[in-house]
């Protein structure tokens, strides 16, 4: 009766590359998604295509981060959630969207800290 192969009678030698195997990459840890206030946001539309942010991309956003000049932010304006670019002018933070200012009354909800693209 044949017996199942259990690997105990292997010939040859173990691969020397086995010592150089990288551990599995944990994207939650690498992108800081275990931190409170860090979220994934899926982009809808091409409003920031000039910044390399495309429709369907995932942004890692941090609600605790403060916007810096030229950062991409998630903003809320008139009950609408938009991606905008933060600019500093005359010591004030202004948000630009499609070439125009979003104006007063716009709040920054989070700052984009990383981009994940599922497709090329």
Image (tube, rainbow, N blue to C red):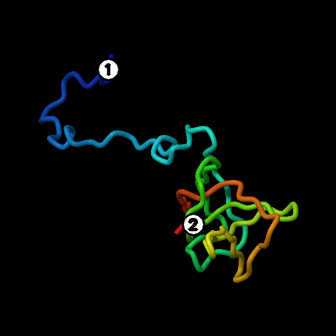
- Which residue is outermost to the left? 12
Q: Residue 100: x and y, percent?
A: 73, 81
* Above/below status of 17 relative to 13: below
- Earlier in the chain: of badge 1 and badge 2, it is 1
Q: Which residue is mark 1?
A: 2
* Foreground residue among 106 and 28: 106
Crowding at dot 1, Cα within 10 Å, few <14 / some 14-19 / many 20+, comes out as few
Q: Is residue 45 left or right of residue 72?
A: right
* Above/below status of 65 relative to 4: below
Q: Residue 82: x and y, percent?
A: 75, 66
* Foreground residue among 75 and 30: 75
Q: Which residue is mark 2?
A: 71
Q: Nearer the viewer, mark 1 or mark 2?
A: 2
The residue under the point 78% across, 64% down is: 106
Q: Is residue 32 left or right of residue 53?
A: left
* Foreground residue among 112 and 67: 67
- In the picture, residue 41 is in which quadrant? bottom right
Image quarter (top left, top right, bottom left or bottom right) of the N terminus: top left
Disc 1 to disc 2: CB gap under 8 Å: no
The residue under the point 12% across, 35% down is: 13
Crowding at dot 2, Cα within 10 Å, few <14 / some 14-19 / many 20+, comes out as some
Q: Which mark is residue 77?
A: none
């Amino acid at each position: 009766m044949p017996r199942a192969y259990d690997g105990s009678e292997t010939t040859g030698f173990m691969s020397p590359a086995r010592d150089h195997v990288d551990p599995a990459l944990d994207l939650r840890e690498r992108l800081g998604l275990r931190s409170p206030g860090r979220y994934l946001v899926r982009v809808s539309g091409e409003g920031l295509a000039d910044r390399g942010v495309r429709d369907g991309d995932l942004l890692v956003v941090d609600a605790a981060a403060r916007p810096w000049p030229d950062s991409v932010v998630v903003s809320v304006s008139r009950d609408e959630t938009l991606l905008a670019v933060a600019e500093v002018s005359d010591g004030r933070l202004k948000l630009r969207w499609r070439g125009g200012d979003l104006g007063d009354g716009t709040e920054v909800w989070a700052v984009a800290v990383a981009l994940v693209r599922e497709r090329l």
